[in-house]
Image: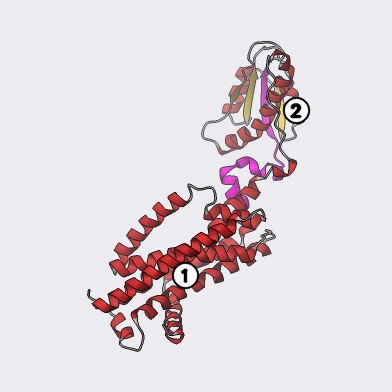
């Protein structure tokens, strides 16, 4: 293969990317997420954990306390997120129905240090967003009350439970989990998925537009055409991933091991691109190739994600600076897979050329 021919094919396909509206829109969407990641992560985090924003909230929710006097009432009054009112249960439930209260807590007459279980009833509005937020906030108070009850009744235990002390630095926030466990891995692997879908379009459109014969009428070979398109798709991966990492860093999100992250992303991307190239060469029709490729990728991802050291987890470990030797072991395995897929792609392209384009 001649480097000049590869470069010509690569430049031709890169110039034509501006006409692919779907690809351009997908890249612009990723760019938007990376540029405004600090803003977006606040809203996205609150979707799956309303309590994640409790530290920023200055709203005090009205809570009615009905029933007997208990330490739970003191815990609720000490929490600055609630404004506690002493009310009868019937009046409290009526006020809740009129949305004058956010929740009602009813505690029956039970000795905290006795042997009977303490049953607490909480009333909230059904299918209400504010009720979901209040429930999360009340959970913290109820967990503290449960801890106090366990301390009062510890003498009733015949066998002491095993005490587990976690290091203080292992407690991570929801923002930390969202950024490093979800945002960064997905944002970095989107270029791989886009490039793999793009290689199918680049190859199948040559068949459908009958332009492959024109390319092969020049001194170019079939393998040079295929590898030129593969390189055009592959070069987009480090450009996009590197841009996302720079924008995330500009959003004050610290990311470590950036060179290793880019190497891993490029290697994983090459696997998907080669699979896409083989699929496109076999089916030669865009719809069928995209369908088979998408199905195969879903099955492959489900299989890979079943292992602890999967690509998404590895990127998260690298970004946080806690990855060990497993990163090089995985890189070695993926490199061998790339060599195998590359050899299969090269052989298949030569076979197609030897049999003729219609074969």
The image quadrant that residue 346 belongs to is bottom left
Can you give x and y, in whole percent of width and height, for residue 271 in the image? 45, 64
Q: In the rendered view, does 178 fall on the left or right side of 11? A: right
Tell whether label 2 touches label 1 (CB within 8 Å).
Answer: no
Front position among marks 1 and 2 = 1
Q: Secondary structure at mark 1?
A: helix
- Which disc number belongs to residue 77? 2
Q: Is residue 74 above or below residue 198?
A: above
Picture residue at 37% right of the left edge, 68% below the top: 344
The image quadrant that residue 74 belongs to is top right
Q: Residues within 10 Å of mark 2 (few under 14, many from 20)?
A: some
Can you give x and y, in whole percent of width and height, for residue 352 in the image? 28, 75
Q: Give the residues in magenta.
A: 42-67
Per the model, the C-alpha gap separating discs 1 and 2 is 54 Å
Q: Secondary structure at mark 2?
A: helix
Q: Is residue 196 visible?
A: no
Q: Is residue 51 magenta?
A: yes
Mark 1 lies on residue? 24
Q: Nearer the viewer, residue 96 or 227?
A: 227
Q: Is residue 281 above or below residue 325?
A: below
Q: Is residue 226 above or below residue 290?
A: below
Can you give x and y, in whole percent of width and height, for residue 239 in the image? 55, 71
């Amino acid at each position: 293969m001649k480097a000049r021919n590869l470069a010509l094919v690569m430049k031709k396909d890169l110039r034509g990317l501006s006409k692919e509206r779907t690809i351009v829109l997908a890249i612009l969407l990723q760019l938007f997420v990376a540029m405004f990641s600090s803003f977006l992560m606040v809203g996205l985090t609150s979707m799956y954990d309303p309590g994640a924003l409790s530290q920023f909230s200055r709203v005090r929710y009205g809570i009615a306390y009905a029933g007997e006097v208990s330490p739970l009432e003191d815990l609720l009054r000490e929490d600055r997120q609630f404004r506690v009112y002493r009310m009868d249960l019937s009046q409290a439930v009526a006020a809740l129905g009129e949305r004058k209260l956010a929740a009602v807590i009813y505690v029956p007459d039970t000795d905290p240090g006795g042997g009977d279980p303490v049953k607490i009833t909480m009333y909230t509005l059904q299918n209400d967003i504010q009720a979901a937020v209040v429930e999360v906030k009340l959970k913290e108070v109820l967990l503290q009350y449960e801890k106090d009850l366990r301390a009062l009744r510890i003498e009733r235990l015949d066998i002491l439970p095993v005490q587990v002390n976690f290091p203080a630095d292992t407690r991570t926030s929801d923002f930390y989990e969202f950024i490093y466990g979800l945002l960064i891995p997905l944002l970095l692997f989107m270029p791989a998925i886009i490039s793999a879908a793009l290689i199918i379009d680049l190859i199948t459109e040559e068949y459908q537009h009958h332009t492959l014969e024109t390319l092969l009428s020049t001194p170019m070979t079939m393998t040079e055409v295929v590898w030129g398109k593969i390189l055009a798709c592959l070069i987009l991966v480090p450009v996009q991933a590197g841009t996302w990492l720079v924008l995330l860093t500009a959003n004050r999100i610290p990311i470590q091991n950036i060179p290793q992250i880019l190497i891993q992303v490029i290697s994983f991307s090459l696997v998907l691109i080669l699979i896409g190239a083989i699929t496109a060469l076999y089916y030669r029709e865009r719809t069928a190739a995209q369908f088979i490729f998408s199905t195969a990728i879903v099955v492959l991802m489900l299989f890979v994600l079943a292992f602890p050291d999967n690509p998404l987890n590895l990127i998260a470990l690298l970004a946080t600076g806690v990855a060990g030797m497993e990163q090089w072991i995985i890189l070695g395995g993926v490199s061998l897979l790339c060599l195998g897929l590359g050899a299969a792609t090269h052989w298949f392209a030569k076979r197609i050329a030897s049999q003729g384009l219609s074969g």
